[in-house]
Image (cartoon, helix red, strand yellow):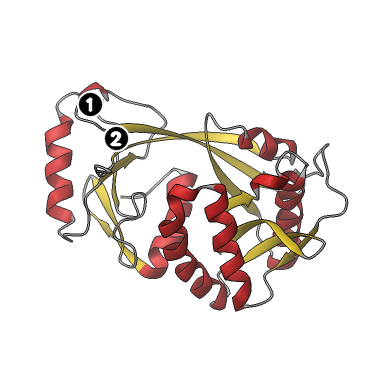
Amino acid sequence: MKLNSLCLKTDLIFIKFDGEVINRETYQVVKCHSNPNFFWGNFLIFKNSPKIGDLENWKKIFKHEFTDPRIYHQTFAWDVEEVGEIIEFQEDGFKLEKSLVLVAHKHQIKLPFKNHKTVEIAPLKGHDDWKLIIELQTRTNPQYGNFYQMQAITYQKMVAKNIGLWFGAYLDGKLVGSLGIFTDGNIGRFQIVSIDPTFQRQGICGTLVFRASEYAFEKIGVETLVMVADEEYHAAKIYESVGFVSEEKMYGLCLYPDPR
C-alpha cells in the first residue's frame, strides 16, 4: 500500500530505523520494537477512513497483528483527509486525534516577527546534553516523561547514524528549548519542539524553528521540511510565522490504556 500522506510517510522515518512496516492489501502494520507503549509508533494505517461497521473488524485486525502482551492500546490512522464515520469508535472509548501538517521549502522560511535576538541555537554537543533535553521535555509535559526517555535512546542512535540532528536553544549557557530534525532523502521531519515553561512567549520557539530550518536547508541539504502540530494548539501559529504553510490534515483514533 503506497502512502500519500506526508505525515504518515515521515512518521515511518523513525519506525523503519528501529521497527518494521508490514504491507497488507488494504492496510499497513507499523511496529516500534523498542517502545511497545508508543501509541503512535505501534498502529495500523488503513487505506480508507472508517465507515459504519468497521469498529469490530479493525479491533480484530489489531489484536491479530499486535501480540506483544505489553501493548494495551489500539491506534488507527488512515491515508485520506477525511474524518469518516467515527461515532461507534467514540462510543467504544476511542479518542479522535486531529493534526495539522505544515510544510516549508527553503525560499519560504523567514525570521518570525517575534525574533529572540540573544538566544543561541546550536546542535547538541555531547551525550550529557541529552539528559538536559529529557529534563526539559519532562518539565514541559510531565505526563510523557517515560516516553521522552525511551524515545531519546532512538533519537541518539539516529543522530549517531547521521539521519538527523538535535538542536538546543541556550540563554546564558542554559538550555531553554530544543527540537530534532530527521531526514529521509531530501525531506526532513521535526520532532518534539519543547520550550522551558519559564521562557515561553518570548519568541524563543519561532527563533529556534527558524534557525534549525535554516541549518537543515543549508547544511544538511533537505528540500522540504515537515512539521506536525495539534490542530487546536497555538504552536501551529508560531510555525506559520516562520513560513510553514498548512498542507494537509491528519486524523486518527486511539483507544488509550486505562490510567488506573
Tag 2, which secondary structure? loop
| Callout count | 2
Relative height, residue 1 to residue 234 (above, below): below
Q: In front: 229, or 147?
A: 147
Q: Which mark is residue 48?
A: 2
Query: Which percent across, then down, holds residue 193?
Result: 60, 50
Q: Which residue is mark 1?
A: 51
- Who's the residue at 51% across and 71% down the image? 158
- Who's the residue at 56% across and 72% down the image? 159
Q: Residues within 10 Å of mark 1 (few under 14, many from 20)?
A: some
Query: Which percent across, then down, holds residue 238?
Result: 69, 37
The amino acid type, in three-letter code, at marker 1 is Lys
Q: Are marks 2 and 1 in contact (CB under 8 Å)?
A: yes
Q: In front: 84, or 158?
A: 158
Image quadrant containing the C terminus: top left
- Who's the residue at 45% across and 64% down the image? 149
Q: Look at the image and tell me whether residue 90 can be seen.
A: yes
Q: Is residue 119 left or right of residue 67?
A: right
Between tags 2 and 1, which lies in front? Answer: 1
Q: Look at the image and tell me whether residue 184 can be seen.
A: no
- Which image quarter: residue 68? bottom left
Tag 1, which secondary structure? loop
The amino acid type, in three-letter code, at marker 2 is Asn
